[in-house]
Structures are given as structure tokens and as C-alpha cells.
Amino acid sequence: MHIIAFITDTDSVRKILDHISETAQPPTIAPARVPPLWEAAMASEQACNDPLWDMSAQPVPEFEFDQRITW
């Protein structure tokens, strides 16, 4: 499948969506949720058992990654 055209006219897009019985309104964004309780329990259990475990520390990557964009 190849894209051969884009429809950018809002009135045309609205008519097409109305014709196929789809709403032209974007979906509502759900509010953020708290993490599941089992993840918090595991994190606190691991922190209690391992004195060297630090939630804010991240391991050093094993290789250097170049993040520059090259086209």
C-alpha cells in the first residue's frame, strides 16, 4: 500500500468521517494512573534487602552511543 495523497481540508475530512459514521472529535485523554501496588512493594522490598541498591542510580552503559543525527 502506498500513500498517494493527503486530505488537509478540514471540511472534507469532517464530511468523510460523517459519511463513514466516525466522530471528528479526538478521543479524551485518560488521566495518569499511579503505579500498581505490586511494583511499589517489589521496589521497597528490593531496597530493604540490598544496601547498595539506589533508585536514582543508573548503570553506566557498556558502550558509547553517538546520538548525533546524520542524514
Image (cartoon, rainbow, N blue to C red):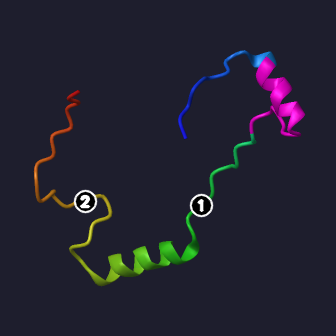
**Mark earlier in primary sequence (1, 2):** 1
Q: Residue at x 84, y 39 (%)?
A: 22
Q: Residue at x 27, y 66 (%)?
A: 54
**Label 1 crowd (10 A; few <14 / some 14-19 / many >=20):** few
Q: Position of residue 20 (x, y in %)?
A: 86, 38
Name the quadrant containing residue 61. Answer: bottom left
Quadrant in which the C terminus is drawn? top left
Q: Does residue 38 sit above or below 31 in this rendering?
A: below
Q: Residue at x 41, y 74 (%)?
A: 43
Q: Residue at x 10, y 54 (%)?
A: 63
Give the magenta range.
12-26
Which residue is disc 2 drawn over?
A: 57
Q: Residue furthest bottom?
A: 49
Based on the picture, tell me whether residue 13 belongs to the magenta stretch. Answer: yes
Name the quadrant containing residue 36. Answer: bottom right
Give the number of callouts. 2
Residue type at mark 2 is Ala
Quadrant in which the N terminus is drawn? top right
Residue type at mark 1 is Val
Q: Which mark is residue 34?
A: 1
